[in-house]
Image (tube, coloured by chain):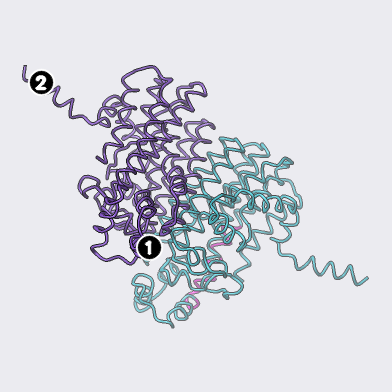
Chain colours: A purple, B cyan
Amino acid sequence: MGVIVNLEDKRKKLSPLDKMASLIEDDLKAVNQEIVTRMHSPVSLIPELAGHIIAAGGKRLRPMLTLAASKLCGYDGTRQILLATCIEFIHTATLLHDDVVDESELRRGMDSANALWGNQASVLVGDFLFSRSFELMVEDGSLDVLGILSSASSVLAEGEVLQLMTTGDTETSETAYLDVIESKTAILFAAACELGAIVGERPEPEREALRAYGQNLGVAFQVIDDVLDYQAQEDTLGKTVGDDFREGKVTLPVILAFSRGNDEERDFWRRTIEGLTQKPEDLAHAQLLLKKHGALDDSIERARHYSAIAKDALGLFPESEIKQSLLDVVDFCIERAN
Amino acid sequence: MGVIVNLEDKRKKLSPLDKMASLIEDDLKAVNQEIVTRMHSPVSLIPELAGHIIAAGGKRLRPMLTLAASKLCGYDGTRQILLATCIEFIHTATLLHDDVVDESELRRGMDSANALWGNQASVLVGDFLFSRSFELMVEDGSLDVLGILSSASSVLAEGEVLQLMTTGDTETSETAYLDVIESKTAILFAAACELGAIVGERPEPEREALRAYGQNLGVAFQVIDDVLDYQAQEDTLGKTVGDDFREGKVTLPVILAFSRGNDEERDFWRRTIEGLTQKPEDLAHAQLLLKKHGALDDSIERARHYSAIAKDALGLFPESEIKQSLLDVVDFCIERAN
């Protein structure tokens, strides 16, 4: 029965993310449709630019978490569609503003919006998506949701400012680094997951569990992202390798290598990351130093710590396909770096 | 009785804006206090940068409108304090992003935030203030308010993008110009005023009247601002004269002069505004052309049209000191340009 074998082979090849997508397939389609509908504006540049960055794809990980969490909470209404769209709009607005801040030329392997349309348009279209997301929340009509997402947005902005302040500072501590990624990344993961418990009208412990799941997944995800910035190939990561290095971002691998390095090595980090005086061969040398001190491997180990907490947070939910999928996605986020 | 005469002299010198401020003195103090309290963040750069732009002063015209409208509606609670703070935060966020978009070096006569802290910080602190304003709205707890301000924010962002698209386009029509300023300026004036009717729980016609008052005042205000950009002295306006010209913004005076000009003059506008190829003497020549075609005077006349509508909109409110003050402020906005 060759056909069945083929199907099974195919199923095996599904990544945990694809598996999750298949479990929430209809909702995900509805969200993609909603994104297109709701980013509409009579001002043509807005859907054009927003469409570019949203179509550039990304994994839709954050809205998927809202959909999966809603399903985990047994919710069978439709509120999750609009709310997942809000999450994606906030995330996209952040990406647009990030690219301006980082002066990135590439985003997920495509020209970034600011490279194509200029910083000005990126700032303003980001503002639009952000405002639009609040319009959608008002349409949903829950002050609870509005409270979570307005507060998450403030923390997110604080995290971005904090990151700006630590950029180039090789003395940044691991704690300060964690503060930054908890604010700039994990908070939106946490909010995305908590929304599932809200639409499902689940009791406080489940709400908190989903929040903790999202929070810790978010931290693990960002640590791995920062590892990949020194490790991945451009075509698999969809972003330029060495971006963080070139921008002088002080991420966990650098913090570990700096703290474990000798004087000469610290001078190297100070020249390249603080002084931003970089020669073409410096990235390769940085990668060598990271390897020498096991900085990438140990960063991955740190990420595993958070991923374990994320998985345990789901303990109070009964076993189900969607729960397994949420657990598998945590491991998948770590395995990207192996 | 020299003292009394002195007092009267002093009273006569109060501008209508000062007069309004004196009528809502306690509320205005409370708002200024609230602004300082609510822009706080553990991330020190945020209150530092936000404090700079908010302290740079400005007229606080928009929050004053919320306070005055609340008083006009006979509201004697405290909700207007928080809501006026929201309005000022949204406005400040817009200013921060505007300066990045315009690459302005001066804002109200002081170094602009982006000149001092860089574009990156301006974008992110703007995002923070914007998010924070939504947090404050959630604290107020009215979906009605959230609906008005989230929608106003979207329209505002659309207006900014629209302005970006017309920048440098000397063929911009007066209608397109009006679309821009209705979105980017008037919408927040309208929302600021409408909030008064909402906290006062006034019937729909009064809500609409206050909205119309704010909308038309906002249009008149922006037209006059655009006139002043070619007319004012740097020390009275608190911004660089000729900013719009140097940035290639197509405002009403330019639209009128372009449409009334001969071929040679249109070539001048195309070179300077579209091509942004400007010589030091070009601003003076532009001012000469505006004068030749009565473009500034006629722009002021256009503004008067909107100011008349604004004043008539208040017809259904009974006479009172605060109503008179709202009327006087309309005239004052026009008279700035005389």
Quadrant that contains the N terminus of chain A? top left
As drawn, the residue found furthest toward the front would be A262
Q: Residues at marks 1 and 2, common chain?
A: yes
Residue A59, percent from left and from top: 29, 38
Residue B304 located within the stretch drawn in magenta: yes
Residue A321, percent from left and from top: 31, 20
Residue B305, percent from left and from top: 57, 59
Report which residue position mark 2 lands on. A5
Q: Secondary structure at mark 1?
A: helix
Q: Is residue A76 above or below residue A284?
A: above
Q: Which residues are magenta?
A: B291-307
Report which residue position mark 1 lands on. A270
Badge 2 crowding class, 10 Å Cα cut-off, few under 14, some 14 to 19, many 20 or more, is few
Quadrant that contains the C terminus of chain A? top left
Between the residue at mark 1 and the residue at mark 2, the CA separation in whole angstroms equals: 56 Å
Which three-letter amino acid code belongs to the residue tagged 2? Val
Residue A29, percent from left and from top: 29, 31
Q: Is residue A284 left or right of residue A181?
A: left
Q: Is residue B147 left or right of residue A325?
A: right
User: Is residue B176 visible to us here?
Assistant: no
Residue B228 located within the stretch drawn in magenta: no
Q: Earlier in the sequence, mark 1 or mark 2?
A: 2
